[in-house]
């Protein structure tokens, strides 16, 4: 998924909760991997290929701060 697509998803999704069912490698506009992985549902990016799994067990305060 491209960065721009991830950003668009994120904007559209807004503050709705997401359980990050599936991650995809994030790529820039010319197709190079950024090293991040994004949720295909909400576009949230993380540095690890399985950050969605880790997050299930750990409440992430980051999400709350997005409600600005
Ligand atoms: Zn998501």
Image (cartoon, rainbow, N blue to C red):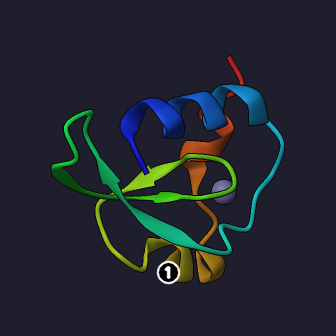
Quadrant where ligand 1 appears: bottom right
In the rendered image, the quadrant that contains the C terminus is top right
One can see residue 63 in this view: yes
Q: Residue furthest right?
A: 16
Please provide percent x and percent y for residue 56: 64, 79
Residue at 22%, 47% (x, y): give it.
Answer: 31
* SS state under label 1: helix
**Residue 30 drawn above or below residue 52:** above
Residue at 67%, 39% (x, y): give it.
Answer: 64
Please provide percent x and percent y for residue 27: 28, 48
Residue at 42%, 80% (x, y): give it.
Answer: 50
Other residues around mark 1 within 10 Å, as few (<14) / some (14–19) / many (≥20) = few
Q: Quadrant of residue 48?
A: bottom left
**Residue 62 drawn above or below residue 60:** above
Q: Which residue is mark 1?
A: 54
Please provide percent x and percent y for residue 21: 68, 74
The residue lying toward the viewer, choosing from 45 and 27, is 27
**Residue 21 drawn above or below residue 24:** below
Q: Left or right? Give the position of 25 relative to 33.
A: right
Please provide percent x and percent y for residue 18: 76, 58
The residue lying toward the viewer, choosing from 15 and 30, is 30
Residue at 19%, 37% (x, y): give it.
Answer: 30
Q: How many numbered marks does the figure carry?
A: 1
Q: Left or right? Give the position of 11 relative to 51.
A: right
One can see residue 14 in this view: no
């Amino acid at each position: 998924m491209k960065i721009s697509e991830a950003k668009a998803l994120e904007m559209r999704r807004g503050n709705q909760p997401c359980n990050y069912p599936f991650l995809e490698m994030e790529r820039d506009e010319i197709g190079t991997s950024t090293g991040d992985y994004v949720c295909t549902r909400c576009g949230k990016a993380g540095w690890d290929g399985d950050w969605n799994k880790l997050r299930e067990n750990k409440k992430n305060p980051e999400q709350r701060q997005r409600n600005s």
